[in-house]
Image (cartoon, rainbow, N blue to C red):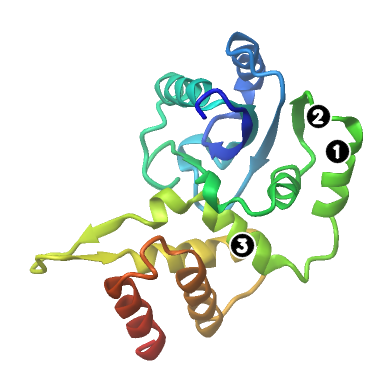
């Protein structure tokens, strides 16, 4: 239902100096329950904003969400592709959010927040969960990739090929950059294994014949 409010997750490459303007936007759009988490990375992504970006958790209906996204895109020129080619925003497919608590914990992990409408105990619980010792770095990576999913799912045409190929290099680079930003060393075999995990569990077309062929070829020839 278009009027049903649900939690929606995403991020945008917006400088932190605009946070109060964003708070004002929340009021203008009558978004009474939200979290905005300010983060900065040094892995080469979000070059236009020198690594600064903002994660969002919004409790909104579809109409308000779509209008808010469009305003955000125009106001902050969010027309880039993946953080390396301009300002960029990514939003989660709600059907892929199996555990909203985990995504909230991922959002608040740097504890630099503006929030409203949540209970203080909810924020405290999310912060506690986000700071647990990470044998869960793979889960955090997958959550990160899912936020980037709209870009990672894009296919690119290759010269001399009438068809198109899933952008596996972009996926592998995103996995490598994630670990570099965490100051965690990662090797080729680990990148390949994590990419395969993502493809098998989260690639949109994984159950089609073409999707199965791509996963098989990646698994057997890498």
* 176 in relation to 23, above or below: below
Task: Kindly report the distance in space between the C-alpha atoms of the residues bearing marks 1 and 3.
Answer: 23 Å
Q: Please provide percent x and percent y for residue 186.
A: 59, 76
- Tell me the CA gap for discs 1 and 2: 6 Å
Tag 3 residue: 141
Crowd tier of the residue under label 3, counting other residues whose Cα lies within 10 Å: few below 14, some 14–19, many 20 or above: some
N-terminal of the two: label 3 or label 2?
2
Q: Earlier in the sequence, mark 1 or mark 3?
A: 1
Report the residue at 50% width, 52% height from top.
Answer: 44
Verify CB contact (< 8 Å) between mark 1 and mark 2: yes
Question: Mark 2 — residue?
Answer: 118
Q: Quadrant of the C terminus?
A: bottom left
The residue shown at (37%, 39%) is 80
Look at 53% across and 66% down and name the residue there: 175
Which one is nearer the viewer's eye here, 197 or 7? 7
- For this view, does 133 lie left or right of residue 140? right
SS at circle 1: helix
Q: Position of residue 195 (x, y in %)?
A: 48, 72
Mark 1 neighbour density, 10 Å: few (under 14) some (14–19) many (20 or more): few
On the image, the x and y values in percent for residue 132 come to: 85, 60
Work out how far the residue at label 3 is from the one at label 2, CA to CA, in angstroms.
25 Å
Residue 17's label in the rendered image is none
Name the side, left or right, on which 171 lies relative to 36: left
The residue identified by callout 1 is: 122
Residue 190 image-quadrant placement: bottom right
Q: Find the residue positioned furthest to the top.
A: 28
């Amino acid at each position: 239902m278009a009027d049903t409010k649900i939690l929606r997750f995403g991020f945008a490459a917006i400088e932190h100096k605009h946070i109060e303007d964003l708070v004002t936007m929340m009021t203008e759009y009558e978004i009474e329950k939200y979290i905005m988490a300010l983060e900065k990375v040094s892995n080469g992504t979000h070059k236009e904003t020198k690594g600064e970006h903002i994660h969002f958790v919004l409790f909104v209906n579809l109409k308000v969400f779509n209008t808010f996204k469009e305003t955000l895109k125009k106001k902050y020129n969010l027309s880039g592709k993946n953080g390396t080619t301009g300002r960029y925003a990514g939003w989660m497919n709600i059907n892929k959010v199996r555990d909203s608590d985990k995504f909230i914990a991922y959002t608040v992990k740097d504890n630099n927040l503006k929030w409203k409408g949540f209970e203080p105990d909810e924020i405290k619980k999310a912060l506690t969960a986000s700071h647990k010792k990470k044998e869960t770095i793979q889960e955090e990576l997958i959550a990160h990739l899912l936020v980037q999913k709209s870009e990672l799912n894009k296919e690119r045409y290759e010269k001399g090929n009438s068809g198109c190929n899933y952008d596996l290099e972009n996926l592998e680079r995103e996995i490598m950059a994630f670990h570099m930003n965490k100051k965690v060393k990662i090797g080729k075999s680990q990148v390949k294994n994590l990419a395969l995990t993502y493809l098998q569990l989260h690639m949109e077309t994984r159950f089609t014949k073409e999707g199965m062929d791509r996963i098989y070829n990646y698994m057997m020839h890498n």
